[in-house]
């Protein structure tokens, strides 16, 4: 079984400041890890994913995340926040490997990012 | 449109009534998922369809919930005898490949259900 914990249901940053959204996972098998973003009244959109290749993953809109096995973390960062980054961000995990339930994406509870001018 | 389409976008119903929510996935996507999004609770997996295989219904919260997928395309999620705790946004997603480990999930905008 796998689970995701997102630390902080709400993060507020100033425009131009560093964005750091925290995600810790639990998985009994090597995980696949994802960050999705949800803008108001829209569906979720994939930001980036880790699937056992490079541990530093770059995504859209300048976001990146680093897989740290020793810390069971997959924190999302962006060097400089824009007003347009205001949204809800979800970390998710699925079990890697063949067969089983690797198709089930387990989501965290989400972190709402507010960007102040 | 090219994206995942869900209808209705909003549904208000009375406790005890049945509701049907529809999902039209991206053409050619073989995998289809239903999730439930409740305020402050993240996304809860409900059910997964892959091609002609038997669906994984392990996430359905009770026997009042059922889903089908006709012709490998459109899916309908049915909630019978709705309860107030069923109020949530129901999200549908589709994927080209076997699962999110190998492919990206494309989400619809959701159907917001309010049970009075």
Image: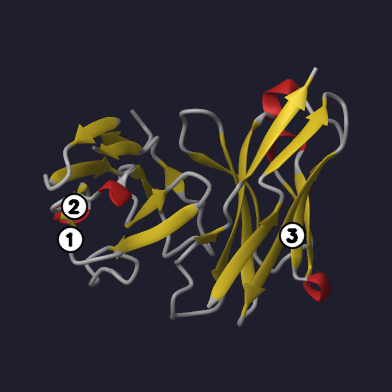
Describe residue A43's horizontal placement relative to residue A58 as left or right: left
Q: Quadrant of residue B3?
A: top left
Quadrant location of the N terminus of chain B in the rendered image: top left
Do circles 2 and 3 both sit on a common chain?
Answer: no
Percent coordinates x, y for residue B14 in the rendering: 16, 38
Residue B41 is at least partly visible in this image:
yes
Chain letter of disc 2 in the image: B
- Label drawn at residue B64: 1
Which residue is drawn at the image coordinates 54% and 64% (left, top)? B101
Question: What is the distance, in whole Å, between disc 2 and disc 3 at their CAs?
Answer: 36 Å
Q: With respect to residue A19, does B58 lie above or below?
A: below
Mark 3, secondary structure of its residue:
strand
Residue B40: image tag: none
Q: Image check: A89 left or right of A103? A: right
* Residue identified by numbered label 3: A74
Instruction: Name the subunit of mark 3.
Output: A
Q: Secondary structure at mark 2?
A: strand
Q: Are marks 1 and 2 in contact (CB under 8 Å)?
A: yes
In the rendered structure, the residue with mark 1 lies on which chain? B
Give the colouring mode of the picture. Answer: secondary structure
Figure quadrant of residue A80: top right
Q: Position of residue A19 (x, y in %)?
A: 81, 39
Q: Nearer the viewer, residue A31 or B41?
A: B41
Residue beneath label 2, please?
A: B79
Instruction: Measuring from the top left, give residue B57's x and y in whole percent.
Output: 28, 69
**Residues packed near mark 2 inside 10 Å, few (<14), some (14 to 19) or many (20 plus):** many
When asked about the image quadrant of residue B23, the answer is: top left
Left or right, B100 with respect to A9, comes to: left
- Residue count near mark 3 (Cα–Cα under 10 Å), binned few <14, some 14–19, many ≥20: many
x 24%, y 33%: residue: B11
């Amino acid at each position: 079984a796998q689970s995701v914990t997102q630390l902080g249901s709400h993060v507020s940053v100033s425009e131009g400041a560093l964005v750091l959204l925290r995600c810790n996972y639990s998985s009994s098998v090597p995980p696949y890890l994802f960050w999705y973003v949800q803008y108001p009244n829209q569906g979720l959109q994939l930001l980036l994913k880790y699937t056992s290749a490079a541990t530093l993953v770059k995504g859209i809109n300048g976001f990146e995340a680093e897989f740290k096995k020793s810390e069971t973390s997959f924190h999302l960062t962006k060097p400089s926040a824009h007003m347009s980054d205001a949204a809800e961000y979800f970390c998710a995990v699925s079990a890697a490997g063949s067969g089983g339930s690797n198709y089930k994406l387990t989501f965290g509870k989400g972190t709402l990012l507010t960007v102040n001018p | 449109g090219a994206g995942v389409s869900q209808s209705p976008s909003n549904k208000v119903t009375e406790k005890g009534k049945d509701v049907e929510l529809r999902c039209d996935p991206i053409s050619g996507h073989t995998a289809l998922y239903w999730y439930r999004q409740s305020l402050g609770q993240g996304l809860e997996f409900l059910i997964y369809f892959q091609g002609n295989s038997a669906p994984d219904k392990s996430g359905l919260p009770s026997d009042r919930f059922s889903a089908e997928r006709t012709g490998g395309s459109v899916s309908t999620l049915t909630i019978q005898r709705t309860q107030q705790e069923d109020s949530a946004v129901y999200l549908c997603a589709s994927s080209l490949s076997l699962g999110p480990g190998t492919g990206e999930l494309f989400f619809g905008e959701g159907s917001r259900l309010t049970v009075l």
